[in-house]
């Protein structure tokens, strides 16, 4: 039951982050005072395009965490090292204390599991 609630919260967070990103349209507020004004009132002067898409990055982090949570601990370590950190399979093998062939096999199984989870088998349009 706890896993179900956690998954629901992650998906809702991703949905809200995406919605917020669409609403903000990559803009930042320029305020006439610092953001920690004690009386709670701030007047917006103007908006500018954001240099960093914080909401999009947060959505990506939630998606990656959700994807990694579906893997075994060993698969999670291998994918984190080889895909996210860019370490070679040989370096990951040394780090994990297993052979390079074992790292390759674990990586292939993990990627297959992720593909099944996130890719549709059939196109929706005809």
Image: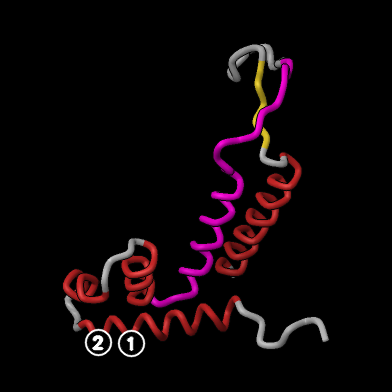
Q: Residue at (20%, 70%) from the top-left corner? A: 91
Which quadrant holds residue 109?
A: bottom left
71 on left or right of 40:
left
| Quadrant for the C terminus in the image | bottom right
Label 1's element? helix
Query: Seen in the image, is 73 located left or right of residue 6?
Result: left
- Do the residues under discs 1 and 2 have CB atoms within 8 angstroms? yes
Front residue (pair 41, 34): 34
Q: Where is residue 65 in the image (x, y as percent from the top left)?
A: 49, 62
The residue labelled by disc 1 is 105
Query: Helix, strand or loop at disc 2?
Result: helix
Q: Is 20 situated above or below 4?
A: above
For image coordinates 69% across by 56% down, the residue present is 15
Q: Distance between the residues labelled 1 and 2?
A: 6 Å
Image: magenta residue range: 43-72
Along the viewing direction, whichever of 35 and 84 lies nearer the viewer: 84
Query: Which residue occupies 69% across, 51% down?
Result: 16
Q: Image height check: is 20 above or below 83?
A: above
Crowd tier of the residue under label 1, counting other residues whose Cα lies within 10 Å: few below 14, some 14–19, many 20 or above: few
Residue 54 sits inside the magenta stretch: yes
Residue 125 lies within the magenta run: no
Q: Position of residue 52 (x, y in %)?
A: 55, 40
The residue at the point 66 percent across, 49 percent down is 17
Q: Position of residue 124 (x, y in %)?
A: 78, 81
Count the labels in the image: 2
Q: From the top left corner, tell me how far across and down residue 113 is, in percent.
A: 49, 82
Determine whether 11 is above or below 32 in the image.
Answer: below
Where, by quadrant of the figure, is residue 121 drawn? bottom right
Relative to 110, 39 lies left or right: right
* Residue that numbered label 2 is attached to: 101
Q: Quadrant of the N terminus?
A: bottom right
């Amino acid at each position: 039951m706890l896993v179900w609630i956690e998954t629901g919260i992650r998906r809702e967070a991703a949905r809200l982050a995406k919605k917020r990103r669409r609403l903000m349209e990559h803009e930042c507020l320029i305020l006439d005072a610092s953001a920690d004004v004690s009386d709670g009132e701030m007047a917006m002067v103007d908006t500018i395009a954001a240099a960093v898409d914080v909401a999009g990055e947060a959505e990506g982090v939630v998606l990656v965490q959700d994807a990694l949570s579906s893997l075994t601990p060993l698969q999670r370590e291998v994918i984190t090292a080889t895909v996210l950190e860019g370490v070679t399979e040989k370096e990951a093998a040394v780090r994990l204390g297993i052979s390079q062939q074992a790292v390759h096999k674990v990586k292939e199984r993990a990627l297959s599991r992720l593909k099944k989870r996130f890719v549709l088998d059939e196109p929706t349009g005809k």
